[in-house]
Amino acid sequence: MGSLTVTHKLPVIDFTMENLEPGTNSWSKASKEAVCALEEYGCFVALYDKVSSKIHDDVFQALEELFDLPTQKKVQNKSSKPLYGYVGQIPFIPLYESMGIDNANTLEGIQNFTNFMWPNGNNDFSEALLAYSKAAAELEEMVVKMVFESYGVEKYYESHIKSVNYLARVMKYREAQVEEAKLGFVAHTDKSFMSTIHQTNQVNGLEIKGKDGQWFKVELSPSSIVVMAGDAIMAWSNNRIKSPHHRVMMGEEKGARYSIAQFSFMEDSLMVETPKELVDDDHPLLFNSFNHLDYLKFFSKEENRRLECALKSYCGV
Ligand SMILES: O=C(O)CCC(=O)C(=O)O
Ligand SMILES: [Fe+2]
């Protein structure tokens, strides 16, 4: 008898329909699929044509130009917020380098970053990044609305969205040399509420860990975005949705990989808090409410980096 190999494939959900709006059939279909995928895998691939091929190509070019800047310049990408700045030159992940753009879906946020990197300005960069970031934020907001609606707590949606700040992290994974390990980025869960990940050139590398512990690869087309649950929605949903472990492995494909991950964080003093409607005898409260940036501060400490589940250690009941 042949052995049974279970292979996972991340659900692909169509967000390209016109009139994808609450109340329509296409909305409720996408909503059911999205919530189901989030509960099963903690993530899914969204087909999303608001990231047009022009935006996709422009962002790729913009990132190539950004990462070609001198390292002394790139390392100056800093922030008073924990884990918002430059990450790179780390011996155990030598392929990886990234920078953070705070408030990325606003003109001000993008311009602050652009003007810092290019004091004489770089309009092509700002335009490309802003267009991408806004589109990705809109996708995330749709998915968050679907989740809030399907759990019957849409009355909290507006205040949630008002509190959200988007951090875009732009990334380059250089090609591994012959004898070099292929690890692009270590296994982790995102600390965000939710994340959107877009691969800006055709070099795959993202891998997800299924509930059964099996790692599997995700192949991404230019018009797709991975929507992924972070630790904060895991706490908020009282464990109905779990933030999946994922990592990046550089494979056979040639050349560097460029990607952009946009993370939502709850700021403006709104705590990450499980709605009382999501707590009952079958679902006892698992996480105490917390301040999102304080959680990041906790995670940024060296001694908390390798915890089995940082969220449980931080605020588990
Ligand atoms: O580059 C990717 O595809 C994933 C990046 C990632 O997981 C992260 O930045 O948290
Ligand atoms: Fe991640």
Image: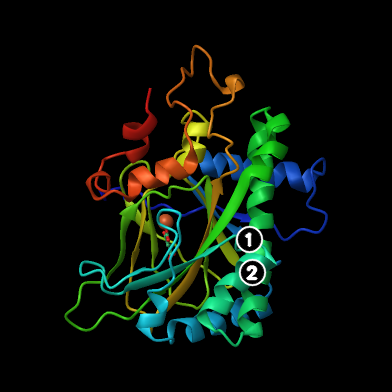
Ligand 1 quadrant in view: bottom left
Q: Which residue is mark 1?
A: 136
* Residue 18 picture quarter: bottom right
36 above or below 105? above
Residue 132 image label: 2
Q: Quick one: 214 or 139, which is closer to the camera?
A: 139
Residue at (37%, 37%) from the top-left corner? 311
User: Which quarter of the rendered picture does the C terminus lie within?
Assistant: top left
Q: Dot 1: what SS?
A: helix
Crowding near the residue tagged with mark 1, few <14, some 14–19, many ≥20 C-alpha atoms within 10 Å: many
Tell me if label 2 and label 1 are in contact, CB under 8 Å.
yes
Residue 224 image label: none
Q: Quick one: 182 or 216, which is closer to the camera?
A: 182
Residue at (39%, 86%) from the top-left corner? 70
Residue at (47%, 33%) from the top-left corner? 290
Give percent across and percent down for residue 126: 64, 77
Crowding near the residue tagged with mark 2, few <14, some 14–19, many ≥20 C-alpha atoms within 10 Å: many
Q: Dot 2: what SS?
A: helix
Relative side of 219 to 1, left or right: right
Give the residue type that dot 2 points to. Answer: Tyr
222 above or below 139? below
Relative side of 229 to 83, left or right: right
Give percent across and percent down for residue 45: 55, 57
Give percent across and percent down for residue 279: 53, 19
